[in-house]
Image (cartoon, rainbow, N blue to C red):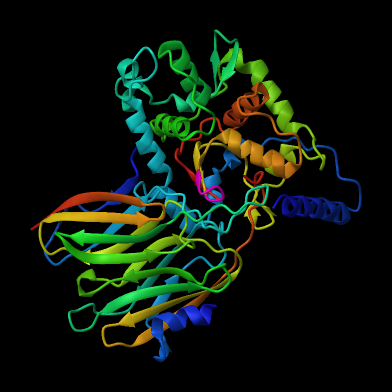
Amino acid sequence: MRFVCTIALAAMLAAMRVAAGFVIPPLAATEIPPAERRSGYSFMTPDTKAIQDDDTANPGMLWVLDGEALWKRKSGTSDKACADCHDDAQASMKGVAARYPAFDRELGRPVNLEQRINLCRTRHQQATPLSYESRDLLALSAFVARQSRGVAITAGTDPQLEPFVAKGRAFFMRRQGQLNLGCTNCHNDNWNRHLAGSAVTQALPTGYPIYRLEWQSLGSLQRRLRNCMTGMRTQLYDYGAPELVELELYLMSRAHDMPIETPAVRP
Amino acid sequence: MLAGAIRNVVGTAVVQTGRVKIDVPPLVENGNTVPMTVSVANPMTADDYVKSIHVFNEKNPQPNVGNFYLGPRAGRAQISTRIRLADSQKIVAIARLSDGSFWSVSADVVVTLAACTEEVI
Amino acid sequence: MASALINVPKKAKRGEIIEIKTLMSHIMETGYRRTATGELVPRDIITSFACRYNGVEIFRADLFPAIAANPFLSFFTVATESGKFDFEWIGDKGFTETASATISVE
C-alpha cells in the first residue's frame, strides 16, 4: 500500500519536472487566501457527503453516543464523572473544541483535546489517562467536539500560542523525508489536483475526530497526520509528541473562522 | 465464482434483465465503504411483490454481498447499505418476484486505492 | 456502550410507506486480512439482521464480509398499526444485539 503512494508521488514530481523543463522551483510557501479556503467536505462525492449529513447514518455518531454515556460515568479514585463538574455538555462544552489545541499554564505549552481530557482525568478525577486512539478516548473527544458543531474555529489566536503556531507552520513548510516533500507542496500548492484517485485537499481539520472510510473507524487528527507522514516517507512522531500538537495547532489556525463539522466523514 | 453464486440462488431458472436498478457511484471515494442502493420497480401488493434481492460482486474473494428478504408489507422494494469492493469490478443485483421470475441488473464500479494510508496492523 | 443507531419515524399515517434506517457498531472483519507477520485475522462479521413489527418479521438480511464495517441498512415498510419494531443482529463468535423503536400510527 505504501509503495503505491511512493510511486504516485515520485511520478507526480517527475512529471512536474518534465513539464516545467527546469528544476522544481523553490518552495512556494504561499498559504491559501482565506476566501479560497474550502473544507475537505467540499472535495467529496455526493454519496460520501450524504453519509456525513445524516446523523442517523453517520458512523461517527456511534462514538458520540458512546461518549455521551462515558461523560456520565464515574471514574478514578475521586469517583467523579465529567458531568459532576461540567454538567450538561451541550452547554458547558460548546465552543471548546473550536479553540483547541489550547495553552496549558501548568505545562507551559499547548495541549490538544485528547490531552486535555486526560489531564482532567489525572488532575481532577484521579484516574489513569486513556490510551491514544482507544475507543473511550475517541468517544469522549468526539462527544465533546460534537458540542461545537457549527462554531467558528478560533484555535491559535491566544498570544501565548504564537511561538508554537510558528513551529507548526515551519514543520508544514519544511521539505523532509525520503521524497524531500513538504506538506505545503500538496496542501498549499496542489490542492484540488489528485494523488492517485484521491483529491488533494487543503489540510483544514474542521471535523475531527473523523470517521475515515479508509480506517472504517473513527480516528484523531494525529492518526491522520501519521498517515500523511507514512505517505511522505518521513519519520513518524509518537502520539502526543509536542511536534504533532504544534502541527495540529498550526493546522487549526489555518482553518480560522471555519465551522467545526465533527464528526466528519472523510475518504 | 460469480456464476456459481448466482446459480445457487436462481437454479436453472431464466434471469431476465430489467426492472432492477443499482445506485452506486461509478468512481468510489474509497473501496472500504461504498454506498449502494438497489431498487425494483414493483407495485408491492399482496399478489405482486418482490420476495428477495440478492447482490453479488465479481472480484472480491467471495462472490456474495448480501441477501435481502422483503415481502408484500415492504411497500417499496428498495434497500440501501454500504459495501466493500476490493478492486474495480461489476456488481450484479438479482430480484426474485412473487411469481417466481428473476430479474437482474449489473453496474460497473471503478475502485482506486487511498493515497495516504498507514502501517499495516 | 451504545451499539446501534435507529431511525424510525415516531408517527405515521395508516398505510404510509416509511423508511427505517439502522446502523450497528461492528468491525466486520472479513477473514481475508493478514497481520504484518502474515497471520490471517479470523473472520468476525454480523451474518444476519431481522426486523419485526409487532412480532411479525417484515425484513431480513444475510450479510457477508463484503458489507462494510459498522453496517448500515435501510429498508421500507408500510405503517399498519401503532406498536414496536424489534431489531436483531446475529454474528460470528456468538454476537447478538437487539434494539427497538416505537411508532404511533393514526
Q: How many marks?
A: 0
Report x, y in % for residue C102: 16, 51
Residue at 55% x, 15% y: name it.
A103
Residue B75 found in image quarter: bottom left
Report x, y in % for residue A57: 37, 51
Q: In this rendering, does residue A32 appear at all?
A: no
Residue at 45% x, 84% y: name it.
B7
- Depth order, front residue of C75/A208: C75
Report x, y in % for residue C11: 15, 53
Report x, y in % for residue B67: 38, 70
Q: Is residue A111 left or right of residue C13?
A: right
Q: Where are the magenta residues, as a range? A: A213-217
Q: Is residue A54 left or right of residue A246?
A: left
Q: Is residue B108 left or right of residue A246?
A: left
Q: In this rendering, does residue A98 appear at all?
A: yes
Q: Main secondary structure of the magenta part?
A: loop
Image height of B47 relative to C97, above or below: below
Find the residue positioned furthest to the right: A22
Find the residue positioned furthest to the top: A106
Residue A186 found in image quarter: top right
- Depth order, front residue of A20/C93: C93
- Depth order, front residue of A129/B111: A129
Image height of A65 relative to B34, above or below: above
Based on the picture, tell me whether residue A227 belongs to the magenta stretch: no
Residue at 40% x, 74% y: name it.
B54
Image height of A96 relative to B85, above or below: above
Residue at 40% x, 67% y: name it.
B37
